[in-house]
Image (spheres, rainbow, N blue to C red):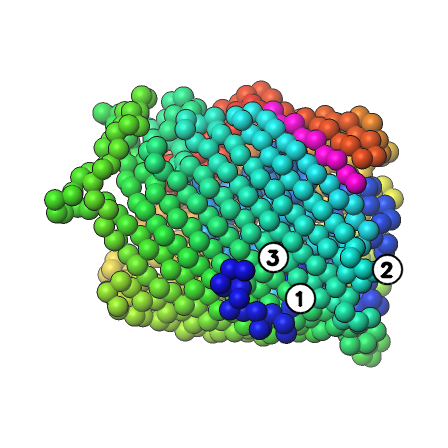
Amino acid sequence: MPAFLRLNSVSLGFSVLLTTGFACAAPTLLPETSINADREAEADSPRVKEVSTATRTATPVRYVPQAIDSVKTAAVLDYGTNDLGTALSGIPNVSSGADTRFDSLRIRGFDASNDFYLDGVRDDSQYVRDLHNIERIDVLKGPAAVLYGRGSQGGIVNRVSKAPEAGRRSSIEAQGGSEDMRSLYADLSADATENISLRLNMGNQDSNSFRDDVSSHRQLFAPSISWQLTPRLNWLAQYEYSRFDRTPDRGIPGVNGRPADVKRETTYGDDRDYIDDKAQSLRSKLTYELNDNWQLRQTLSVFKLDSDFDNTYLTGVNAVTNRVSRARFQQDLQTRNVFNNLEAEGTVDTFGFEHRLLTGVEIGSQRRDPKLYAVATTGPGRQTVPTLDLFNPDRNQSHTGTMVPSSDNHTEVESRAIYVQDQLRLNDQWQLLAGLRYDRFEVETTNMAGIKDGRDDNSISPRVGLVWTPLQNHSFYASWSKSYAPVGGGQIGITPNVTSNANDLDPELTRQKEVGVKSDWLDDRLSTTFAVYELELYNRRTSDPVDPRLTILTGLQRSRGIELTATGQLVGNWYLRGGIGLQDATIVKDNNGLEGNRVSNVAKRNGSLFLTWKPEQGWYAETGLTLVGSRFADNQNTTVLPGYGRWDALVGFRQKDWDLRAALNNLTDRTYYSSATSAGQIRLGEPRNVVVTGTYSF
């Protein structure tokens, strides 16, 4: 057993796991369903009727006064997609900002790189997440600090993991495709006794790339157990080990305001480059039914990441000489997160009103230790990183000079929070959601010279929402929410002994106003959501115009948008999933020269539409379009990423135990650009490729 798990073995005996979306409400609060009933039909439908990400209680999507989109991972894994940026690229007003180092997203125009969660537990370390042990991905749009704490300006992404279920069948899946892509995964289930259910997800994937000398290797091992200890007490525990060893690829540079006109396979790294992420998580959840109306949940989550890299990457290009400049860094990063959560949920009636109450306490402890090495600029081993020709890079030109320590920081974060929420049913037409959370955040960083600095912040985050259902299948809603982002709370850590006032600033604050309507159509088979919102970061950090060395909180970043989504069954064996988003994400006030600019990696319009025909057995097919408008690669708005449309399709044949399918991505072989880290680092999307998948269930 890994050391970090042994150290916590005592506390595990008394703790809990937060797993498939905090779900498990008291029996009187949820309709009873059979685990086996209509499982095949439910798996085929893209629709998710009930979520807990938005309220930490199992709530029908239609009664959540906030937009939330859910993506079943099976729908994207069939196309060979195993990263969040690509999986969510068609979600309205969601865009990728990732490179091969770590996951990064924009939600409603705001950076959500540190707003990732696993079964509702904060998962903000910098790595690339595996989707094979994930049932679905929930994207909650807008501030979510009322339940999740700091950050979450544009929204959060919560991955809902696969958990044991009594009677579930097992499956083995093999996949192969273009660029030597091959994988083998198993999803095994067993009922050890009538009170114990087991599940094991494990597998391996190898792949090359259309990019020169870029490859990757993944491993996954994820066992879990659900044990009904007594009629009222359940224990759910999950462990996951994932490894992703890959070649880093920062893409191509921009030239004269556009991506460089080079071959799609052109890279500018070094043959020795690598990134190796090893992530481990252990989650344990105890659920105790106090009585027919109240439930107690206690949760422990432990996460550890070891990530190493050696990366020579491009930083820009000289448009006159066509020489690409490069830098080289090495890093040894360790992070460790421990979160404990205690929640009580139940119903009470007062004066004829029905209250669904939730209250919770969260305690968190995080550590981050990045040791960074840079190219020596002095001494006998000094050597600059060779530049390369833009069009014909000779990647044998390597940096062979000395690497010296650049930084070695140790950061500790302690967080405490208490929150309360009331879902109040006023009558058959009106429901009110109100919540409040108090957070205390403490960060302390020690640098390689032994200099230490810290910062403490307190904040209160509110949310209020109203749902009106004048017609049985149509719910109109309005909501207002607020979140905060303290200094050192994103990529955790501050700079000790900084000469400016950066460590002394108050948190940035974000507020959202949203109205919309959620509807069910076609005898409750198809669901739609229409939302209009305004989201403002109204005290954005910016330079002091009097003394540019100082930072003040007078900036403004605003996003206004409209979203429409539809998911479900049209008629018979026909299914639909898709949506469209329109948004204007702008830096409204700024003293750094960015005023009036659009936010990088954010398109004014994006969306997707997939149509599926899938009978119970036999042949089935799917086709769909993903559309993304033009974006800027940088906040300076110097380089444009052209908009694109990608057409994908899938055909398959299934019987009771077998399922064979083939997917063709980017049918028209369109050259497009998926994201950018800067104007000098632009990632290309995949060219036309095929993925064949075979599944055997037993």
Q: Residues within 10 Å of mark 1 (few under 14, many from 20)?
A: many
User: How far separated are the C-alphas under marks 3 and 1?
Assistant: 12 Å
On residue 285, which mark appears?
Answer: 1
Toward the bottom, the furthest residue is: 351
Distance from disc 1 to disc 2, alpha carbons, whole Å, reads 21 Å
The type of residue carrying mark 1 is Lys
At horizontal 66% and vertical 62% (from top left) the residue drawn is 237
Query: Which is more toward the observer, 418 or 365?
Result: 365
In the picture, measured across the screen, residue 611 lies left or right of residue 246, that is right
Picture quadrant of residue 1? bottom right
**Sequence-wise first label, 3 or 1:** 3
Q: Would you say the residues marked 1 and 2 are in contact, meaning their CB atoms lie under 8 Å apart?
A: no
Specify whether residue 341 is painted magenta.
no
Nearer to me, 402 or 411: 402
Name which residue type carries label 2. Glu
Question: At numbered mark 3, what does the secondary structure look like: helix, strand or loop?
Answer: strand
State the mark number for residue 32.
Answer: 2
Q: Residues within 10 Å of mark 3 (few under 14, many from 20)?
A: some
Give the percent coordinates (x, y) of residue 166: 80, 54
- Can you give x and y, in whole percent of width and height, for residue 618 in the image? 83, 27
Where in the figure is residue 509, as x and y percent of width and height? 48, 63
Q: Which residue is mark 3?
A: 239
